[in-house]
Structure formats: structure tokens, C-alpha cells
Image (cartoon, rainbow, N blue to C red):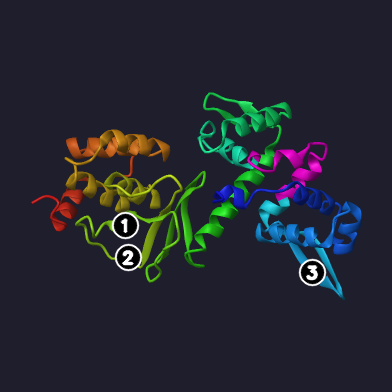
């Protein structure tokens, strides 16, 4: 079973074709002749590049012409291949290498557990030798000398995530993302049965004894998480809009209602991944002291108490 990243990685043939296209629009016969590539193999690779939103096809008479797409990630990749045309991208953007690069643009730049050690070592050595990756306290990051590469990876990852979200619905909206985990909002009349999409946040509040009405459902996409716990519902509700007091109140209601069952250690570890640890600490303190902290989007205790009574969280 291919990972998400493997579906969107590049082959050496694809990079060769793209380097040819940096010279401008090309006909199929031009590419076949220039790269000495047979028509079936060329068609196969062009189809993959089309799915990735990198190229577009136009018909001129009876001839088909290929050029870079106008999408942001395609434009950045074109710029990268032109600006750093001396770099061996055929070995640096292919196979597991791009998975490593995706990790390097996030805070999880040291988490390579899904990649075989021998493969990881080989690609890391190659990427470091070309000055693409550099060591950091957290693991690895893209060298600042390659800003176009970082921009491309960010935009390409965003494109992939949006494509995944649209497998639920064309109207799906990505609310938050990090690495290849993301929170998505979709119309309520659509059920996400696709693998790795888990119903969460406000969609589960009614099940938790806090009935609310919404025209949307919220899903969390993750290859790692197999089920959604109460702590996850709290955090995912905040991720919808961290500075919106309404969502903060929903999360506070869950914290209050299930305070005896909440695993604080797990909650804080997960909160740190989402940059919500300060907010969760402040919310826990708020429930203890009834006093909000100045820099956090919290209600007054009177406001919270009224909502808590409405939902019978407190009597």
C-alpha cells in the first residue's frame, strides 16, 4: 500500500521531462526526440504529472503540446529547476527523498520512523552532501539557501492535502494542517467513508452530551491515529478557530464534564503538537480559578457558567 507521499513523489523520468519543459512549451514529438523516450513511457509519465497539477496539455491542430501548469506549486517547481539547474534533482526529488523533505519543512523534521533505516540514511547523506538539508536541534531542515524549494514543498503539500479533502466533497474546506495530518470541514449530508478520515470536534459534541446544531461535519485525517478520544475532540474543536470564544467554550465544557476521565498527560502532549499547550494550560487554570488570563481567548466565568448550566454540565 502506497503512502500519500509516494502517490505524489516524482520519478527520474518525470524530472527529466520537467527540466525539458523549463525551456518552454514542447510538443510530444519534441520531448520524445530530445529525451529519447518512447511514446508509451512518455504518456505514462505525463499522466502522472497531470494528476499532480504540475503540467497542462493544449492541442494545436493535430499536435498535443505540454507546458508547466499555472498553479502555484507548479510555478515554484519550474523556478526551482531553473534557478538551481546544476543540482541533481533527479535523485533529490524522487522516491523516499521527497518524504524526507516534507518532514523537514515541519516541526517533525526528526520523525522518520516510517522510512526504512538504510533508505533513510542513503537519502539523508545525499541531501546533506548537496547542501539541501542541514542539522537542527529538532532534526533536519531545508537549507535557507534554497527558499524556492521550501516554498514549493509547502505549496505542493497544500495541493496534495486539498486533493485528499476533495475525496470527501468538492465543497470540503481544510481548516488546519501539519505535515500530512489535517482538519477538514464538509457538508453535513456527506458521510466520509474514505480511509483515515475520522469524525471529530463539534460533530461529536452531541454524542458527548453537549447537543449543538451545525450544517457541517468535521473530520481529522491521519495515517497514525486510529480512533478519536475525548482529549482529541477538545483539541480538534479548538483547531477549528483557536481564537473564537465559542469553540473555546465547547472545549471548556468537555474539560469540565469529563475532568475525572481526562488524561492530562496525553492532552498536553497532543496540545504541544498543535501549538495549543499554552491555551490548554490557561483553560485548565480557568476552570480552577474562574479567572481568565489576559492573553487567551476565554469567556468570563459568568458566561461560561451560564452555558454550563444550559448543557447541564454543572447544576
Residue 69 seen anywhere in this rendered image of the structure: no
The spot of residue 76 in percent (x, y) is: 71, 48
The residue closer to the viewer here, 281 or 245, is 281
Task: Determine which residue is flagged by label 3.
Answer: 58
Within-10-Å neighbours for mark 1: few <14, some 14–19, many 20+ = many
| Residue 164 image offset from top left, x and y in percent | 53, 58
- The residue labelled by disc 2 is 214
Residue 70, position as x, y percentages in the image: 72, 59
Where residue 181 sits: x, y (%)? 47, 47
Instruction: Using the image as rendered, state which of residue 268 and residue 180 is in the foreground.
Output: 180
The disc placed on residue 202 is: 1
In this rendering, the answer to whether 138 lies above or below 257 is above
Q: Earlier in the sequence, mark 1 or mark 2?
A: 1
Of labels 3 and 1, the one closer to you: 3
Residue 168 visible, this angle: yes
Front residue (pair 185, 87): 87
Q: Residue at x 53, y 34 (%)?
A: 112
- Secondary structure of the residue carrying numbered label 3: strand
- Disc nearer the start of the sequence (3/2): 3
> What's drawn in magenta, residue-wise?
76-97
Q: CA distance from mark 3 to mark 1?
A: 45 Å
Q: CA distance from mark 1 to mark 2?
A: 8 Å
In 3D space, how far apart are the residues under numbered discs 3 and 2 (Cα atoms)? 43 Å
Q: Is residue 50 left or right of residue 271?
A: right
Name the image quarter holding residue 214.
bottom left
Amino acid at each position: 500500500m502506497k503512502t500519500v507521499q509516494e502517490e505524489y513523489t516524482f520519478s527520474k523520468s518525470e524530472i527529466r521531462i520537467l527540466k525539458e519543459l523549463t525551456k518552454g512549451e514542447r510538443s510530444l514529438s519534441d520531448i520524445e526526440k530530445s529525451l529519447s523516450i518512447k511514446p508509451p513511457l512518455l504518456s505514462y509519465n505525463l499522466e502522472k504529472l497531470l494528476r499532480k497539477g504540475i503540467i497542462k496539455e493544449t492541442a494545436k491542430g493535430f499536435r498535443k503540446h505540454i507546458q508547466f501548469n499555472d498553479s502555484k506549486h507548479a510555478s515554484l517547481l519550474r523556478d526551482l529547476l531553473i534557478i538551481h539547474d546544476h543540482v541533481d534533482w533527479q535523485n533529490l526529488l524522487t522516491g523516499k527523498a521527497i518524504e524526507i523533505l516534507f518532514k523537514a519543512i515541519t516541526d517533525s523534521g526528526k520523525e522518520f520512523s516510517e522510512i526504512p533505516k538504510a533508505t533513510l540514511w542513503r537519502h539523508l547523506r545525499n541531501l546533506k552532501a548537496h547542501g539541501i538539508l542541514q542539522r537542527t536541534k529538532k532534526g533536519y531542515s531545508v537549507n535557507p539557501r534554497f527558499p524556492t524549494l521550501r516554498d514549493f514543498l509547502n505549496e505542493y503539500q497544500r495541493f496534495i492535502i486539498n486533493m485528499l479533502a476533495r475525496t470527501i466533497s468538492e465543497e470540503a474546506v481544510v481548516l488546519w494542517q501539519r505535515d500530512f495530518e489535517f482538519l477538514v470541514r464538509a457538508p453535513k449530508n456527506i458521510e466520509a467513508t474514505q480511509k483515515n478520515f475520522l469524525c471529530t470536534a463539534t460533530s461529536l459534541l452531541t454524542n458527548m452530551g453537549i447537543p449543538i446544531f451545525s450544517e457541517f461535519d468535521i473530520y481529522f485525517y491521519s495515517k497514525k491515529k486510529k480512533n478519536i478520544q475525548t482529549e482529541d475532540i477538545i483539541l480538534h474543536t479548538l483547531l477549528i478557530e483557536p481564537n473564537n470564544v465559542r469553540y473555546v467554550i465547547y472545549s471548556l465544557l468537555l474539560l469540565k464534564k469529563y475532568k475525572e476521565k481526562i488524561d492530562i498527560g496525553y492532552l498536553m502532549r497532543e496540545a504541544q503538537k498543535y501549538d495549543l499547550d499554552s491555551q490548554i494550560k490557561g483553560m485548565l487554570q480557568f476552570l480552577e480559578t474562574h479567572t481568565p488570563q489576559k492573553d487567551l481567548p476565554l469567556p468570563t466565568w459568568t458566561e461560561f457558567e451560564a452555558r454550563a448550566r444550559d448543557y447541564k454540565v454543572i447544576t
